[in-house]
Image (cartoon, rainbow, N blue to C red):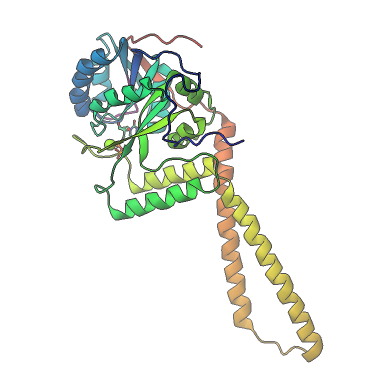
Amino acid sequence: QNPPRSTDPHVPLPGEDGLLPERGTPTLSCVIPCHNEAQNLELLLPRLAELLPTLSRAWEVVLVDDGSRDATAAVIARWARQPGFVGRVLSRNFGKEAAITAGLEAAAGEVVVIMDADLQHPPSLIEPMLAHWREGADVVYAVRSHRDDEAWVKRVGTGVFYRLLNAFDRFEVPEGAGDFRLMDRGAVDALLQLPERNRFMKGLYAWVGFRAVPLPYVPEARVHGRSSFSFKRLLNLSLAGLTSFTTWPLRIVSVVGLLVALVGFLYGGFLIIQYLLWGNEVSGWTTIVVTLMLFLGLQMVFLGIIGEYVGRIFEEVKGRPLYVVHRALGRGLGRREP
Ligand code: UDP
Ligand code: MG
């Protein structure tokens, strides 16, 4: 039996499936990964400090400094002196996915919101997210309603990537959904139980399932600084995503191998019969060289595909921690130990 598709927009009303406890005003954690965001934090944090008390019973903002080279750590340290602000300063840059995981591990709220520090994710969306949660959604993920702001290369690339990623699987990673989302405690705990080191978060969110509803929004422009995700980094991220959520490239390798072997076999038979009937004047140098090059190339590509997977296995087997916390600052809701 297939698990429900995580993108199913139908969310049962409270009590419809008999699984829902009353959902009133929750305690809320806001997890923010920060990489060189000192200036943006000074704008975002006052807004959150004003907004969150109106939405929750008790709240905290978990700020993760992901090896910033500007004053981000200092800004976080200063804010963490106020109640409600928690800081985790990582020992170096571990990447956004690791920073989010660090934040989720520190967060204690019944409901957790993940958002970027660069003000691209409007805090005003937290309220409608909570409304969906109250109606029974376990996950509310913001979906960009258009990608006009991006170059067409990136749009086409993204389209191809999601096609490849979602080929043959029982759950779907929705395109246009990012890390900006609200998650119920149950979904967060499920996410934190996944042991892998290759944390392609968008895939992991979809993998854990739960009742997820999309919430369309228009992302704002980054206020200060530049995006950390260059073309090279995006390519790396897509490879990480593909290798940790698919195995069909390996299957293609075997199928193509089989087909080539079959063709070789048939052509071999033909050559033998031809030789027996008419003998052989040696020629066909071009054919030999061309086919050799073709299949050598194909073999290299296939080895590369296998190598990608072997590399990931190596990373997983080493079992290193996902991140190292250099300093833990401030007090929030207080993480209850599971
Ligand atoms: N970020 C991070 N570690 C990194 C890169 C980015 O914690 O190595 C954070 C960054 O501070 C921001 C969020 O991830 O809060 C999104 O990054 P960015 O705005 O650069 O990416 P984009 O908006 O282009 O996807
Ligand atoms: Mg951004």
Q: Quadrant of ligand 2?
A: top left
Q: Is residue 85 left or right of residue 256?
A: left
Q: Residue furthest right?
A: 276
Looking at the image, residue 169 sits to the left or right of residue 85; the answer is right
The picture quadrant where one finds residue 300 is bottom right
* In this view, 119 is above or below 293: above
Residue 199 in view here = no
* In magenta segment, residue 255: no
Residue drawn at (43%, 29%) of the image: 11
Numbered range of the magenta stretch? 62-69
The answer to whether one can see residue 74 in this image is yes
Q: Residue at x 27, y 39 (%)?
A: 227
**Where is the N terminus found, in terms of image quarters?**
top right
Residue 52, image x and y in percent? 26, 16
Q: Is residue 198 left or right of residue 248?
A: left
Residue 113 point in image, percent of width and height:
34, 23
Q: Is residue 326 above or below residue 171?
A: above
The reply, left or right, for residue 196 in relation to residue 136 is right
Question: In front: 106, or 161?
Answer: 161
Magenta span contains residue 65: yes
Q: Residue at x 41, y 22 (%)?
A: 136
Image location (x, y in percent) of residue 205: 45, 32
Q: Residue at x 73, y 73 (%)?
A: 266
Give x and y (percent) for residue 310: 59, 44
State the count of labels. 0
